[in-house]
Image (spheres, helix red, strand yellow):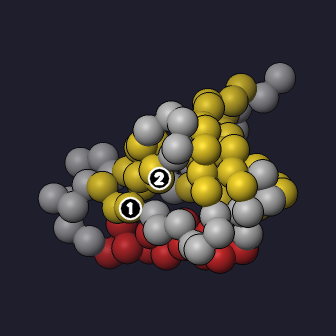
Amino acid sequence: MAKYLSITTTNDGVLYAPIGAGMMAELTSATAVRLYLGNTVTHHIALTCTGANQAFIDNINSALRTAAETSWTNAIVPVSLPSGVVATDYAMTVFS
């Protein structure tokens, strides 16, 4: 069974990011977070944020760990947004 992280955004609704073969989160700036999917080197999910910080990355990593440790029937693991962090938009990006 597939597992997903859910991140609520203000403009694009809920992002259900597939965990698949793993995921790595990168804090690019206070306005940008990238989620690299483990099964591809050509795509990432770009999150547009306000106030993104290391605590947000830590929460993503915690949710990934929770997903790995839970049964297959718990397919969706929410990522909590730290105080002051707002996720506004997301997009699938293709590296060129």
Check disc 2 and give the amino acid type: Ile
Marks 2 & 1, CB-CB < 8 Å contact: yes
Residue wearing tag 1: 78
Residue wearing tag 2: 7
Q: Residues within 10 Å of mark 2 (few under 14, many from 20)?
A: some
Quick one: SS at disc 1? strand
Q: Identify the image quadrant of residue 78.
A: bottom left
Q: Residue at x 73, y 69 (%)?
A: 53
Percent coordinates x, y for residue 71 in the rendering = 20, 67
Q: Is residue 57 visible?
A: no
Q: Residue at x 23, y 48 (%)?
A: 1
Q: Nearer the viewer, residue 72 or 86?
A: 86
Percent coordinates x, y for residue 67 in the rendering = 36, 66
Q: Nearer the viewer, residue 50 or 66?
A: 50
Mark found first going from the N terminus, 2 or 1: 2
Q: Residue furthest left?
A: 73
Q: Is residue 66 visible?
A: yes
Q: Residues within 10 Å of mark 1 (few under 14, many from 20)?
A: some
